[in-house]
Amino acid sequence: MKDLLAKLHTLIGKYGLRGLIAKVSATLWAELRAGLALPVLLYPARVRQELRQSLAGDYERVILWRSGFGYHVPLYQRPQQMACALARQGCLVLYEAKATADHVDSIMPIEKNLLLVNLRSPFLRRMLLQELDRVEKAKYLQLYSTNRDCSLHELQSFVRRGWRILFEYVDALSPEISGTSRLPKPVADKFLYAMTHPEVTVVTTAERLRRDVLRRRGGTNLICAGNGVDYAFYQQWEDYDFEPAFRAILARGKPVVCYYGALASWIDYELLRMIAAAGKYSLVLIGVRYDASYEQNMRGIEGVDELGPRDYRVLKYYAKAADELILPFLINEVTRATSPVKLFEYMALHKPIVSTDVDECRRCKSVLIAKSRADFLRQLDHALELQSDEAYLALLDAEARANDWSEKARAVVQGLKKQEKLPGD
């Protein structure tokens, strides 16, 4: 109840009471439509034929991504990026659609070997699993360690059908990540299962997470594949017309320091206040208020331009207009095990990067690491000197290329192939 009330307070602050009611109504309608899936009910033979055609393609294995993280949400993150990259590596990826974002009644092709599927419909779900039972290739249920939608019982039902489990350990297990006061039971249950069943393939995104798996269950079926960047996307530029508010920020003439991402409890708000108070920079924050922490820490603070979220397709234009990009994280158990997607996107933008002493950031040569808040301000000054440093810009580019999503997907596929070739498989 406490978590629900806290979430309700945050949502009312974000949307207002009337806006929240409208959003809840739209969500309920979308869920009802997805659950009914009228085309599946009215034309089952046609839908089954579409499924068979999709499953008859050229691919090596099936991966069913089970999550509530929609494909067409504004935050284009690891789930969508890895889905595309794995499809290009010869996997048939079936990505669970989100009712409010994807509006899929049955299936929707995104690109070759990548389909959105409406698992909210019990009729389509049953039909899909029946057709997949006919596919004589390795099949994987892919889950995030933070996933709350899939229960342990459901996971075990896939195992009984002969499926393998691909468990992505992407963050330290913490209520902060879940936005709750306690770790949700489905999260804890599935994590325990993955850590006590060595046949589960575990993918880790950070060195600290890899060491945790080694300690718990050894290195069997363990794949290391951190986050990355769609390098080619960050080389494609067109003219973009910023809104007047952002043009006014640029017109001030101050160096623009930008952070984009979740505004959450793991942000060092005192550091942000210090940057704003210095008066030397235009501090631009782009992203969603993940919890109530921003309002609690930044209300009334001058010198900060909070723009709210921007769609992935245009976000890069705002970041490109900045002079330097930052990762202002607190150092705790959550951030020590974090591989920030934005880190590699920052690299591909060829902008100087300043970060607090985050483990995964420290592993990258192009990142200016600050050991304290005062040092962070000094590193901001140093970063300005690197804007036109050809050697530094080349380093950014090289590290971005080395962390392309294609490389991350290749590491996963190579690990799966090794497992599939084991005797008895």
Image (spheres, rainbow, N blue to C red):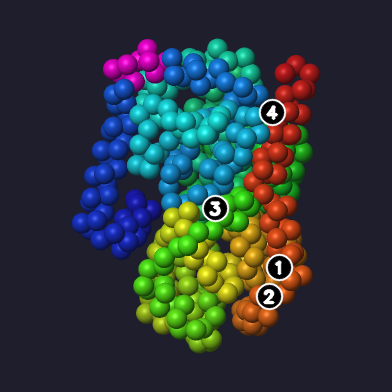
At 39% from the left edge and 26% from the top edge, which residue is drawn? 106
Three-letter residue code for mark 4: Glu
Q: Nearer the viewer, mark 3 or mark 1?
A: 1
Q: Which residue is mark 1?
A: 393
Q: Which residue is mark 2?
A: 388
Residue farthest to the front, as pictured: 239
At 79% from the left edge and 18% from the top edge, which residue is drawn? 423
Q: Which residue is mark 3?
A: 174
**Sequence order check, earlier mark of 3 and 2:** 3
Q: Secondary structure at mark 4?
A: loop
**Where is residue 295 shown, x and y percent of the image?**
38, 70
Q: Is residue 110 left or right of residue 423?
A: left
Three-letter residue code for mark 2: Ser
Alpha-carbon distance for marks 4 and 1?
43 Å
As for residue 43 lying within the magenta part, the answer is yes
**Where is residue 407 shown, x and y percent of the image?**
70, 44
Q: Are marks 3 and 2 in contact (CB under 8 Å)?
A: no
Three-letter residue code for mark 3: Ser
At 30% from the left edge and 38% from the top edge, which residue is drawn? 30
Q: Which residue is mark 4?
A: 199
Magenta-tinted stretch: 40-48
Residue 87, by quadrant, is top right
Alpha-carbon distance for marks 3 and 4?
25 Å
Relative height, residue 286 to residue 213 (above, below): below
